[in-house]
Image (cartoon, grey):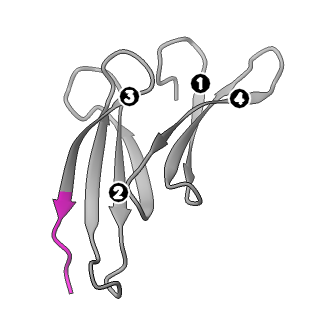
Amino acid sequence: VDIDDNGTDELLMLNTRTNAIDVWEHGIRSGERKLLFSLPGAPHLQDFIMIDWNGDNAIDLVTLSAKPPFFRDGTNQLTVYRNDGGLPWRRRFPWRLPSRS
């Protein structure tokens, strides 16, 4: 997915060791990838999706963090990183989601 409109696709990877989304760029000529940046997520980062969250035709990033319920303070949180026309995105709209038993 070309997240920064530079004509080169980037690869986004969930890094469960650092609770971050790593954004890698592919070098067209060299064939090598380089780490552009890491977006820190909430603890216990589980998943992410690329979507136009606010209808502005820019790809935003939404992450889901889920702390297992066997911890006394188990939580679920959805966080939107809005693409305002530059990288990295700015963290916006963290929502705590109710947990179900």
Mark 4 highlights which residue? 34
Check disc 3 and report the residue beneath it: 89
Q: CA distance from mark 4 to mark 3?
A: 18 Å
* Residue at the disc numbered 2: 64
The relative height of residue 60 versus residue 93 in the rendered view (above or below) is above
Q: Residue at x 28, y 41 (%)?
A: 80
Mark 1 → mark 3, Cα distance in angstroms: 16 Å
Task: Write the start and end of the magenta stretch as one range.
Answer: 96-101
Q: CA distance from mark 2 to mark 3?
A: 16 Å
Disc 1 or 3, which lies upstream in sequence? 1
Q: Nearer the viewer, residue 60 or 79?
A: 79
The mark nearer the N terminus, 1 or 2, is: 1
How crowded is the residue under tag 2: few (<14 C-alpha within 10 Å), some, or many (20+)?
Answer: many
Secondary structure of the residue carrying tag 4 is: strand
Going from N to C along the chain, the mark reached first, 2 or 4, is 4
Asked where in the image residue 37 lies, by quadrant, the reply is top right
Q: Tag 3 or tag 2, which sits nearer the N-term?
A: 2
Give the number of the disc on residue 9: 1
Residue type beneath disc 3: Trp
Alpha carbons under labels 1 and 4: distance apart: 12 Å
Q: Nearer the viewer, mark 2 or mark 3?
A: 3
* SS category of the residue bearing label 2: strand
Helix, strand or loop status at disc 1: loop
- Residues under labels 1 and 2: Cα distance? 23 Å
- Amino acid identity at mark 2: Leu
36 sits to left or right of 62: right
Helix, strand or loop: magenta stretch: loop
Taking the magenta stretch, the answer to whether it contains residue 88 is no
Q: Local crowd at mark 4 within 10 Å, few (<14), some, or many (≥20)?
A: few
Instruction: Identify the secondary structure beneath mark 3.
Output: loop
